[in-house]
Image (cartoon, rainbow, N blue to C red):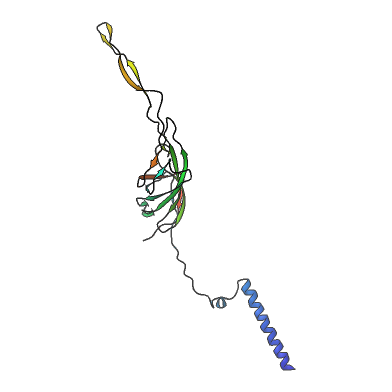
Amino acid sequence: MLEIFEKIVIIARMRALVISLAILSIFGIIPPQVQAEGLSTIQLEMRDYDEITLPAGTFIPVINLQEISTETCPEGYKVKFISTNDLFMYETNIIPRDSAFFGYIEKIHEPVIGTNASMKIKITKLQIKDGFEIPIKGYLYTSNNNLFGGELTQPSEWVKMPHYQSKFQGISWNHRAATLQIRPGGKRSMGQHVKIPAGDQQIIILTAPASITHTLTD
C-alpha cells in the first residue's frame, strides 16, 4: 500500500513539473539553459551608417537608357536612368556611379499648331548597385521648369512688307523709294513630337530632401 502511495506522489510531481514547463514556455520565460538546447546560433550582418540628407536642388548627372518620345510613350510610361558619376558628401560616396534612378512620364502635351509637344518626367526611386532602394522626389531637369519641348514652331507663311528709308540732307528729309522686306506672318506650322534619345546625357534635380540611409562600403 505504501509503495502505491509513493508512486502516486511521484506521478503527481512529474505532472506538475511538465505543466510548469509548459506555462513557462508559453510566456517565454524558460530559463536560458533550457532555451539554449536545440537552438542554433544566428549571425546577423549589420552595417553601421549615419543618415545623410541630400538637399532639394541637388543635381545628379545621369544617362538615358531608352528612347523617350511623346509620339510612342503614354503618360505613366516607366523610365530608367543610370548615374554617370560618384556623388560624394564630405568623404562619403552616397550615390555611387552606375546607381539606377526610376520614374515615369508625369504629363504629356500633344503637338498643336504653333507649339511642339512637351512632357515632364518625374523621378521617384533610387536603387544603389547592391539593390537597396531609396524613395526620392525629383524631375529630369530643364531650364524651362523641367519641361521637355513646348517650343513655338516656325512660321508657316511669310509676307512682304514695304520698308521706307529716309535720309536727312541739308535742311530737309530726302525720302527714298520703299524696299520690300520679307517677315513672318501670323500663321505658324504644326508642332512636332519631342524625344530624348537613348544614351543622352541628362540631369536629375531633387525637388525635396532625400534621406540616404544606406551606403556601400568597400
* Front position in the image: 134 or 47: 134
The answer to which image quadrant residue 161 occupies is top left
Query: Horizontal and vertical percent for residue 204?
Result: 40, 45
In this orientation, does residue 89 appear? no
| Residue at screen point 73% across, 90% down | 5
Residue 192 against residue 32 in the figure, above or below: above
The answer to which image quadrant residue 150 occupies is top left
On screen, residue 213 versus residue 35, left or right, reads left
On screen, residue 165 versus residue 112, left or right, reads left
Residue 89 against residue 177 in the figure, above or below: below
Count the labels in the image.
0
Name of the residue lying farthest toward the left? 170
Quarter of the image containing the N terminus?
bottom right
On screen, residue 172 versus residue 110, left or right, reads left
In this orientation, does residue 25 appear? yes
Name of the residue lying farthest toward the top? 171
The answer to which image quadrant residue 173 occupies is top left
Name of the residue lying farthest toward the right? 1
Quarter of the image containing the C terminus?
bottom left
Residue 105 against residue 9 in the figure, above or below: above
| Residue at screen point 65% across, 80% down | 18
Query: Horizontal and vertical percent for residue 132?
Result: 44, 57
* Front position in the image: 37 or 146: 146
Query: Horizontal and vertical percent for residue 96?
Result: 37, 54
| Residue at screen point 28% across, 6% down | 172
Query: Horizontal and vertical percent for residue 11?
Result: 69, 86
